[in-house]
Amino acid sequence: MTCYPTGSVTSVPLAAFRVCAGCSTLVRGSCQTCRKQGERQRKTAHARGYTYREWVPFRRQFLAALVEAGILPICGAALPSGPAMQDSQCRSNHLFTFASDDGSSLHVDHDPPLQDHERQNTAAVCDLNRVGLLCQSCHAVKTAREAWGVAKCL
């Protein structure tokens, strides 16, 4: 971000106003009301089918399968028989993203997203050919689009 000096105080340019895709209110940045509503509607990881007992070993298995196939575990990576991972802006921009901006690990993402009736089915949740890696930023954009039909709401 560029800062512009004004005397002894540094001012930062303000974000432009935009119309919130959820409620059509004019906002600067993210719409707090819609974001909070979305957070309340989102179920827990366990309720969405990601149990620790199955998901953690599956995640390790997926990462090992990528390495075994000679594929770097970066944002947009998937097995050759897996999804195209078109939601990876990192891959589209030829970036090798090994971790999210905040230092957290990459998200193992289902593509296509799990349907409600599949969430309790371990075979559907832990399908190596249905997942790929996304960094936190790319995953957040995809999740927002799927949940609220917006390009980006964060």
Image (spheres, grey):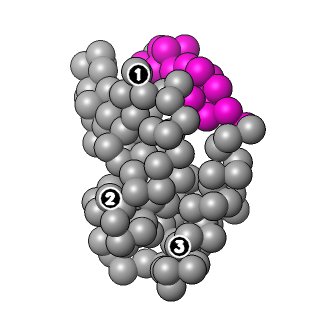
* Residue behind mark 1: 116
In the picture, the disc for residue 66 is 3
First in residue order: circle 3 vs circle 1: 3
Tell me: residue 19, above or below residue 34: below
Residue 35 as seen in the image, left or right of residue 101:
left
- What whole-number distance in Å separates the C-alpha atoms at marks 2 and 3? 13 Å
Q: Determine whether the residue tagged by mark 1 lies in a helix, strand or loop.
A: helix
Please identify the quarter of the rendering in which residue 18 is found. Answer: top left
Q: How far apart in space, not on screen, are marks 2 and 1 (Cα)? A: 20 Å
Rendering quarter of residue 49: top right
Q: Amino acid at mark 1?
A: Asp
Label 2: how many Cα within 10 Å (few below 14, some 14–19, many 20+): some
Q: Say if 94 sits above or below 78 in the image.
A: below
> Could you tell me which secondary element the residue under label 2 belongs to?
loop
Query: In this image, 110 relative to 70: left or right?
Result: left
Marks 2/1 in contact by CB < 8 Å: the verdict is no
* Range of magenta residues: 34-52
Residue 45 highlighted magenta (yes or no):
yes
Is residue 138 visible in this depiction of the protein? no
* Mark number displayed over residue 141: none
Q: Is residue 46 magenta?
A: yes
Say which amino acid is labelled 3.
Answer: Leu
**Residue bearing mark 2:** 83
Residue 19 x, y percent position in the rendering: 26, 29
Amino acid type for the residue under numbered disc 2: Pro
